[in-house]
């Protein structure tokens, strides 16, 4: 397990498990808007073939509240614009080597908060255990984390206005190349 401390300054494109949860910019009425809550959007398996030397299938572990009860809560200002999203609750992910059938169960419970920035980007602050996957970096570039990472600690990342991973701000904790768990 590799330990990271301090600043990482590489820019990459990427995503994380459940990245479809980026803040929306929908306009709301000018009255007080109560927070909204969305149950875990991760309900169906999917396969990614670029993060390891073999395809990896991700599956939620059932609908048991003890293993998959993650929620996303969005808070709004008086103008109805999102000001913060918080994700909490338990989430266990089953990652499977699609070639061999070898599986591992990973705790991806977080929690996390997603804070819009004045420049249109969003700061993701994750703590605790998270499963991250990233697309290959552009040719000639390297990325400071494995493409399939199991992170346990505090990580701050920047996502652009389109929801694309654009930079790793800082990380304190452990990072494990999760591909090695499935070999």
Image: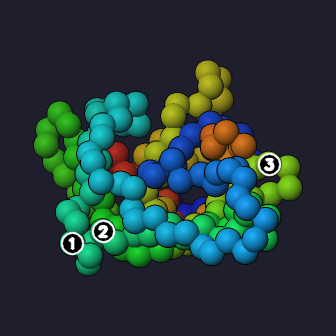
Q: Residue furthest top?
A: 139
Place residue 84 in its image quadrant.
Answer: bottom right
Q: Residues within 10 Å of mark 1 (few under 14, many from 20)?
A: few
Residue 127 place in picture, x, y as percent: 55, 72
Could you tell me if the residues under marks 3 and 1 are in contact, i.e. CB atoms within 8 Å?
Answer: no
Q: Position of residue 140 (x, y in %)?
A: 65, 23
Badge 2 is on which residue? 68
Q: Name the residue tied to disc 1.
A: 64
Residue at disc 3, secondary structure: loop
Q: Secondary structure at mark 2?
A: loop
**Observer able to see residue 113:** no
| Residue 123 % position (x, y) | 71, 59
The reply to whether residue 3 is in sight is yes
Residue at image position (35%, 54%) is: 42
- Residue 120 is labelled as 3
State how many labels appear.
3
Question: In which quadrant of the rendered image does the C terminus lie?
Answer: top left
Is 7 above or below relative to 33? above
Characterize the local packing of mark 2: few (<14), some (14-19) or many (20 or more) Cα atoms within 10 angstroms: many
Q: Nearer the viewer, residue 105 or 75?
A: 75
Question: 53 or 25: which is nearer to us?
Answer: 25
CA separation in Å, label 2 and label 3: 31 Å
Q: Residue at x 26, y 78 (%)?
A: 66
CB atoms of marks 2 and 1 within 8 Å? yes
Viewer-side residue, 165 vs 34? 34
Give the mark nearest the N terminus, 2 or 3.
2
- The earlier-in-sequence mark between 3 and 1 is 1
12 w.r.t. 25: above or below: above
């Amino acid at each position: 397990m590799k330990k990271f401390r301090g600043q990482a300054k590489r820019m990459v494109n990427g995503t994380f498990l459940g990245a479809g949860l980026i803040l929306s910019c929908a306009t709301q009425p000018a009255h007080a808007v109560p927070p909204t809550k969305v149950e875990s959007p991760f309900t169906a398996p999917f396969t990614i073939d670029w993060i390891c030397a073999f395809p990896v299938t991700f599956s939620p572990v059932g609908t048991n509240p003890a293993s998959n009860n993650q929620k996303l809560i969005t808070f709004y200002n008086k103008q109805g614009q999102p000001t913060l999203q918080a994700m909490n609750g338990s989430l266990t992910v089953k990652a499977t080597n699609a070639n061999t059938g070898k599986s591992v169960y990973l705790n991806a419970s977080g929690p996390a908060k997603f804070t819009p920035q004045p420049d249109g980007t969003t700061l993701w602050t994750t703590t605790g255990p998270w499963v991250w996957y990233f697309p290959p970096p552009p040719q000639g570039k390297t990325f400071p984390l494995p493409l399939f990472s199991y992170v346990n600690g505090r990580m701050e990342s920047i996502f652009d206005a389109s929801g694309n991973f654009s930079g790793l701000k800082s990380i304190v904790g452990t990072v494990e190349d999760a591909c090695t768990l499935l070999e």
